[in-house]
Amino acid sequence: MRLILLGPPGAGKGTQAKRLQESRGLVQLSTGDMLRAAVASGSPLGQQAKRVMEAGELMPDEIIIDMIAERVDQQDCRNGFVLDGFPRTTRQAAALDEMLKRKNASLDAVIELAVDEAALIERISGRFSCAKCGAGYHEKFQRPKKDGVCDVCGSTEFVRRKDDNATTVAARLEAYRNQTAPILPYYEERGLLRRVDGMADVDEVTRQIEDVLASL
Ligand code: AP5
């Protein structure tokens, strides 16, 4: 199965993609995570990504398209994947179609997580993750079972993303409105778009996604 999770920053794409990876063995392909790994490596690409991400802008299409094209060719993606944060522009959407066509493959669904902007700010400002294993948490909505200890690996070190500040979040939302939201009609016209209520709690969103997948 090949899926796209679409939605603005903080909509819950990463949270739900991880769950789909665990429950269905779909590989989570997060362009944001790939770029953060490049930043951590200090490579020239990482240095560029750091500037762009901290400004809340989008990386150039050709860099992102090459990154995804290389990744979907890898063996572990053969049984399916869930795209989290890609495509983000009409050019990326068209490039994904080309990529899949070359492989004689197609998308099964594009799932939009619909959320109010006010909720996004609260979600993003409360987000943190485990410094060791990357498990994601939220101060209010998804606290570790034991305060200060990661549920998954037991680490006591947590980190926050540099781009989760008010100025950058405003720029990220604007990039979503101007560059990413326009791809929704592209998928709607092709009968691929399914909407779920991203305002519901995490388990309910997962249930709605499972309903969508069961209906395919
Ligand atoms: P990226 O890492 O993709 O960030 P984003 O799209 O801004 O999305 P987020 O990761 O902030 O949110 P999410 O929807 O995954 O929500 P999450 O599950 O974490 O991209 C970062 C940057 O990289 C971009 O700004 C751009 O510069 C660059 N980039 C990436 N891809 C690119 C591309 N294709 N082209 C060009 N540039 C690109 O949830 C958020 C919080 O809310 C968490 O704390 C979670 O616990 C909580 N939460 C989740 N669901 C719920 C719920 N239902 N109820 C309550 N709380 C919830």
Image: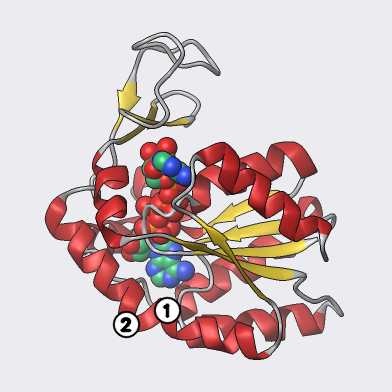
Q: Considering only vertical position in the picture, is 45 above or below 104?
A: above
The quarter of the image holding the N terminus is bottom right
Which residue matches tag 2?
Answer: 178
Q: Considering only vertical position in the picture, is 16 above or below 58?
A: above
Name the amino acid type tagged 2: Asn
Image coordinates of residue 86 in percent, x first then y, are: 53, 68
Q: Secondary structure at mark 2?
A: helix
Name the amino acid type tagged 1: Ala
Q: Secondary structure at mark 1?
A: helix
CB of residue at label 1: within 8 Å of ligand 1?
no
Residue at left offset 81%, top offset 54%: 75
Estimate the spatial distance between the alpha carbons at disc 1 and disc 2, rounded to whole Å. 7 Å
Q: Nearer the viewer, residue 119 or 87?
A: 119
* Occupied quadrant, residue 79: bottom right
In the picture, the disc for residue 181 is 1
Q: Nearer the viewer, residue 79 or 139?
A: 139
Residue at left offset 57%, top offset 47%: 205
Q: Considering only vertical position in the picture, is 137 above or below 76?
A: above
Residue at left offset 51%, top offset 53%: 13
Image coordinates of residue 6 in percent, x first then y, are: 52, 66
